[in-house]
Image: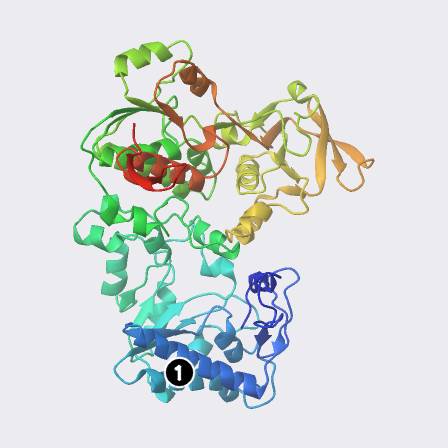
Amino acid sequence: MGLRSPTPFLKTDPARDPYEYNAYTVAPSQMAIGEIPGGPTPKELEEHEIERILQNFADAARRAISAGLDGVELHLAHGYLPWQFLSPLYNLRNDRWGGSYENRLRFPVECLRRIRTRIGARAILGYRINSTSFWEGDLEIDDVKRVHLDLERQTDIDYVSVSAGVHHSWIHTPMTFEQGWEREYSRAFKTVSSKPVLMVGRISYPEIAEDLINSGDADAILLSRQMIADEQWLTKVKQGREKDIRRCVAANYCWRSVVRGSRVQCAYNPVVGREAIWGASSTVTTYASKRILIIGAGPAGLEYARVASGQGHAVIVYERERAVGGHVRAYGALPYRQQYGTIATWLAAQASGNGTEIKLERPVTAENLDVILAAEKPDHIVVATGAAYRRDGFQGQTGKPISGWETGRCVSWDHVALDRVAAVPGEVLVLDEMADVAAPLTAVKLAKGGAKVRLLTRWPMIGMETMPEVYFHWIMTYLQEAGVELITSHTVRQIIGNRAEIANVYQPKNSRRINADLIVMATARTSETEIYRLLRERHVSIEAIGCVLAPRTVYEATLEGHRAARKLSELRWTVAKPGGGSRLAYSGF
């Protein structure tokens, strides 16, 4: 109901009972969703269907209270069904449920009244509403303040939760937005509301939350993404351990996982969704401390170090660079992405606080490997050397480097991000195979440095992988502001010195040559496995985690680091075969 994305159509899977669903959505009016390409057009609700939905809301609220909850909240926001009835943009009806303001207000009023009747006077009843829409033709702050006053007069509510935006680009705001950025909107509600006003808005620092309340901008603070990033936020604040809080960096991996049909996940908190086995109560202290050598201080190695040293193991990390982070460090060095880099610095600080020794600018090579092993005498070695971005244009489509790459000035995007490439005043070509934020923001960085930049991809649009993370709108804004030329549906056929021959994917014979004093590759990564292979030959206790196995994201890296470290001290049941039965087995070494 009130469709915001096409994901509900996943339920039309033939494996499901075809009699238990309708292959369409419903809304107040037959208006296609404008937020996504090919937004499905819903069925316009009939009177009896509206009545059934109102009853369903009331019944659902009653079930929640019966299950032991203290209250319920009606989601009258963000373009979902109740908001669609309220909005003149979505509600084009001319019956008692639409047209005039009073008629558009009818659905939320009736819904809140029925919920109150079903849950009784003692249960808490609130509602969430977006204070402003940031969408032309929809309700804005003065309209919504009027709505709230009428809801206060006509229904028995206990509070209002104020959010902002109909488009998901505003609902899941990026990391560039300041903490508590919605305070002006909640403050506007405070001027008219006799009920408590709750607010959201990229809040992760307790001092910001305190300021918002003390300044009168809100009566209470809501944390959503931050509580996903660190479910122990409140406990740490109470204990004065603010530095231990795992800050939400607004990577929006939580939203990405949901819109792709998975459960909520966090970019660097692998405990989310696994609290039963990995939650705070499951932490163990080892009775047999081991000396662990970790090679590589990227997200996988750091998470391993954090968990293992927290269990009581003696952990030492060797890192060849002057700073920790691996690929996270490169992403955090891009324009508008600085907060992303705090993933690595937080992991390193936590690992060090648990007793881990991190040695920077200490590369492990074939020449010094045996010397390091003799000096450290590890019981177990963890290889987390990651993967290197290639500068030859190697990609999955061709399975080989770009012809002539060695004749041009070719670099990988992370070298640009980390300022390892001298300023280029001429023409730059950024080749994007990854379709995430890396190539677009590298292009922005170069353009702001004075270069004439072209961003080329073989995909039909720039930044396709930024859409599930709700960053596409912002990426395109930055590119347009920086004056980057966008070339889609093209490949680089060959490089000839300071020129590149590009061709249309769908008409390969249509090729042309463009100037390219610098060519930046955001194409492929290759796992750095040399040290792992050398250690395997020495028959020592060893395992590999993270991108050294296969290049992936920070999510998989921290997941593998966490899981592997837990095995050091866990006792796990395993099944003995053949014959069945179980035995208690130590999963360490």
Q: Which residue is mark 1?
A: 112
The x, y position of residue 538, in whole percent, is 39, 13
The x, y position of residue 185, in whole percent, is 38, 68
- Foreground pick, 187 / 237: 237
- Foreground pick, 514 / 309: 309
> Label 1 is placed on what type of residue?
Leu
Total numbered labels placed on residues in the image:
1
Q: Is residue 295 visible?
A: no
The x, y position of residue 588, in whole percent, is 29, 31
Chosen colour scheme: rainbow
Q: State left or right for residue 171 relative to residue 508.
A: left
Relative to 208, say whether 517 is above or below: above
Residue farthest along the front direction in this orientation: 579
- Foreground pick, 407 / 426: 407
Where is residue 314, by image quadrant? top left
The x, y position of residue 553, in whole percent, is 47, 39
